[in-house]
Amino acid sequence: DYPVSVDGEPCLLGVALGTTDRENELNAIRKSEEKYRQLVENSLQGVAILQDDRIVYCNNAYAGMTGYSIEELLSMSPDEMGMLIHPEDREMVRTRHRVWMAGKEVPNHYECRGITKDGSEYISKVYGSRAEYGGRPATQLAFLDITDHRRAEEAAAEYAVKLAKGEDIDV
């Protein structure tokens, strides 16, 4: 009468699956992802991911560099996003992005000027590469604000010229 029997005796059939290894793997992946997320979100470098001509991810450092909130940056249209770049640098930046997205070889870093929310200008060294985000092609960018460094270089060059001319230097 029972659907399962052993040696003519009725019995219950059960299956036990061990999931400890899989759970441990998933926990390790979660911990690794959390470490990476914390590293990127708390980085001193600005980090942004562009996809379909929009910012789909950025960290606090990038938001601070631009003067916009993360929410404002994520909601920008492609035209608004272009306003983050100095007018004289926009075409160069757009060309780099197109080349990366086409999978062609191009140096992975460049310098460009940015425009902040309040209209002031800054200089950044940008490192970029093609990446996948959400399973789709994207551009991953890291920004380093070099404005102070560049101004210090310019001041040093001015002082060198003055010294060469024998002029007094105000320190």
Image (cartoon, helix red, strand yellow):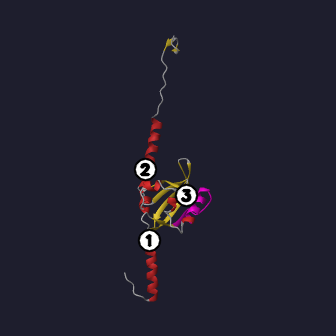
Q: Nearer the viewer, mark 3 or mark 2?
A: 3
Q: Residue 31 occupies which quadrant of the picture? A: top left
* Amino acid identity at mark 3: Ser
Most foreground residue, 43 or 90: 90
Q: Secondary structure at mark 3?
A: strand
List x then y, in percent, for residue 152. 43, 74
- Residue 135 in magenta stretch: no
Up the image or down, 102 lies above or below 13; here it is: below
Q: Secondary structure at mark 2?
A: helix
**Residue labelled with disc 3:** 129
What span is colored magenta in the figure?
A: 92-111
List x then y, in percent, for residue 154. 46, 76
Residues at marks 1 and 3, CA–CA distance in whole angstroms = 24 Å
- Of callouts 1 and 2, the N-terminal one: 2
**Residue labelled with disc 1:** 149
**Residue labelled with disc 2:** 35
- Tell me the residue at 45%/81% (across/down): 158
* Amino acid identity at mark 2: Lys
Q: Secondary structure at mark 1?
A: helix
Most foreground residue, 31 or 94: 94
* Amino acid identity at mark 1: His
Quadrant for the C terminus in the image: bottom left
- Of callouts 3 and 2, the N-terminal one: 2
Residue 29: give its label.
Answer: none
Up the image or down, 15 lies above or below 141; here it is: above
Q: Nearer the viewer, mark 1 or mark 2?
A: 1
- Residue 105 in magenta stretch: yes
